[in-house]
Image: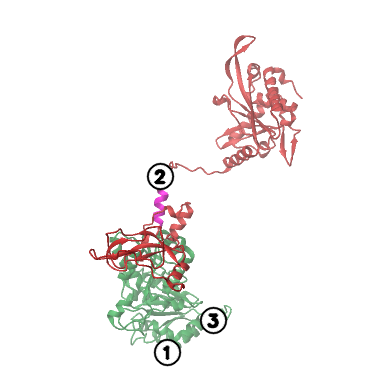
Amino acid sequence: MREISYRDALREALVEEMRRDKSVFLLGEDIGRYWEGAFKVTKGLAEEFGEERVRDTPISESAIIGTAVGAAITGMRPVAEIMFGDLTTLAMDQIANQAAKIRYMFGGQAKVPLVIRTPFGGGVNIAAHHSQSLEAWFMHVPGLLVAAPSAPYDAKGLLKAAIRSDDPVMFCEHKLLYSVEGPVPEEDFTIPFGVAEIKNEGEDVTVVATLFMVVKALEAAKTLKKEGISVEVVDPRTLVPLDKEAIVKSVKKTGRLVIVSEDCKTAGVTAEIAAMVAEEAIDYLDAPIKRVAEPDTPIPFSPPLEKHVLPDEKSIIKAVREIA
Amino acid sequence: MKTGSVIQWFKKEGETVKKGEPLVEILSDKVTYEVEAPASGVLRKILAEEGVDKSVGSTLAFVATPDEELPEAEPSAKPLPIERPDKTTVTIETRGPSRELTLASPAAKRLARQYNIDLADVRGTGPEGRIIAEDVKRLIEEKEESRPRVKDIIPLAGIRKTTAERVSSSFRTAPHSFIIMDVDMTQAVKLREVVGASYTAILAYAAAKALHEYATVNSTLANGGIRVYEDINIGVAVSTEKGLLVPVIRNADKKQITELSSHLEDLVDKARQGKLSKDQVTGGTFTITNLGMYDVNMFLPIINPPEAAILAAGSIIKKPVVEKNKISIKPKLILTLAYDHRIIDGGPAAAFLRKIKEILETIDSSAQKNRN
């Protein structure tokens, strides 16, 4: 199978869905022909689909999502891009109170088939306003689906499924994943939400990781294999719905769990998964659950300090060794 | 707290001690605690022997440099003018005796519960000596190794399950008593040759006749009474590939021997082919079990519940018999009657068995015509 980047896989999903369905259109800051998106996901799309379907917007996240919600209610399938995940906070009312609630408030008479694509994560030295991982915020809003693909294959399959979904989807990407390459089929395919993937089979310790941390967990698994520790890397792929069954199944096999996510430790993705496993599989745990996460600090601008707070291969290896 | 005593000294006289190192264990008011060496040096002399009460303030020992001169006598204890709760003492007392906590992972605990293993028997190899699943598994394996290896597990189902339930219920509830009798089978052997009936059929014939006379054997204990049956329905134990079946010959006392024999043959065939109907395996009032074909001399059967008795037959074996002071060779059979002693006593049971014996010993082809 040919290998393409995560960025190209996302673009391919957008192109295929826009060609398939005329109600699909894009909107966001600088996604059009002049800048083609901050991370170049929408490169060339304005040329193919025109400015009507690839719309540059004013710098107002609230307006972007508000417009998209309105369009979605009237039958369009908008894919909004928020340039940095941190800036979704500016659109939080539109996301949490409107997009997520409308279908329920109108007793199912209105639906909001909206996708909000946005990159989270640090590691590129752009400081506290542009490096956060806020996936857990959206996990806490009933009515939203949350995707978090870690590989080009998942990015394409999940984005296509997200666009076809009648419910609003927070589509979480990661800045450091855009250039990561991997095999992606050229044909049309979707990946259902709520289905985790075992990215590496192992026997001794389960490592549940999301987004860029999956890449780090796989590197850690390779290193640990040389020490004789067999690590099973489970990628939930979507955080809402969460594939509890796959995680619990793996924990039952290994008896040991490390959860890795780049968001803050407190009330974060790792907290939710740890609590779920404690509720559903505590009798299978042979060691305390370990969490590798950002230690509740604003992401520092200083590169050495940023490196210090972000989870990486080393901190994953350390956590695994502690319980293996 | 007024007095205390030394439980043990951690050092012997002459040993070097370091400041802060545990020196002696003290018991007072049912609380024990360790006293650390107040200074570095040599434990020169112990004044408080283990187990002897000392008042508070007494000197317990001298720690000094090797050649330092020691005070000759024990300095007099400074009396405590006012006794007030000492902070340290209170803390220790409220803490109470330390409880041993067995550290074990949830997975280890689950395995221990599952295999009925006491965690106290498991040596933990996890962090801080924590018991992990592997430790419990090791113990399970050790236990398994001392047991015989299992080749196969046959599920307890179907006929096997029914039989298991019935025999154990019978064995538990009906007090079994046994009567054993020799029978001369000369006449029966002749009859078999003449009419071609099987021995089991001949036994059924004799039993039916005897039951007719000894009706209480043809009964069951139910609802606080002995229900004596009008019908004499004789069950015959048949060993099949699938297990033990007991087809029933209804109204056996009203049938001729050849009729009984062909009927029984038909039932046995059906039993072996698994084609018995429900009617053909229910309603029995007495059972016969014959293991003669296995060269069995005699055996003690279990009553087929809720019946009152069962008749067991061994092999017919030619034996020397003394009759009128002469030895002759006769075909002999040992019959065993197992009966429920709640219903039948030894006397009537023996009389019943003797009746069977008499019928068998005097039976002839006239049994063909002898109908009730």
Q: Which chain is red?
A: B
Mark sitting on residue A102: 3
* Mark 3 element type: helix
Q: CA distance from mark 1 to mark 2?
A: 72 Å
Residue A127 to residue B294: above or below: below
Q: Is residue B133 magenta?
A: yes
The residue under the point 30% across, 77% down is A307
Tags 3 and 1 both on a single chain: yes
Is residue A323 left or right of B310 when viewed as pictured? left
Quadrant of the snapshot with the N terminus of chain A = bottom left
Q: CA distance from mark 3 to mark 2?
A: 64 Å
* Contact (Cβ within 8 Å) of mark 1 with mark 2: no
* Contact (Cβ within 8 Å) of mark 3 with mark 2: no
Mark sitting on residue B119: none
Question: Chain A appears what colour?
Answer: green
Q: Chain of mark 1?
A: A
Nearer to the camera, A49 or B9: B9
Amino acid type, residue under disc 2 in the picture: Glu
The residue under the point 57% across, 37% down is B243
Nearer to the camera, B347 or A262: B347
Q: Residue under label 2, please give it.
A: B145
Asked whether the viewer can see residue A305, the reply is yes
Q: Looking at the rendering, which quadrant does residue B359 occupy? A: top right
Outermost residue on the bottom side: it is: A58
Stretch in magenta: B132-141
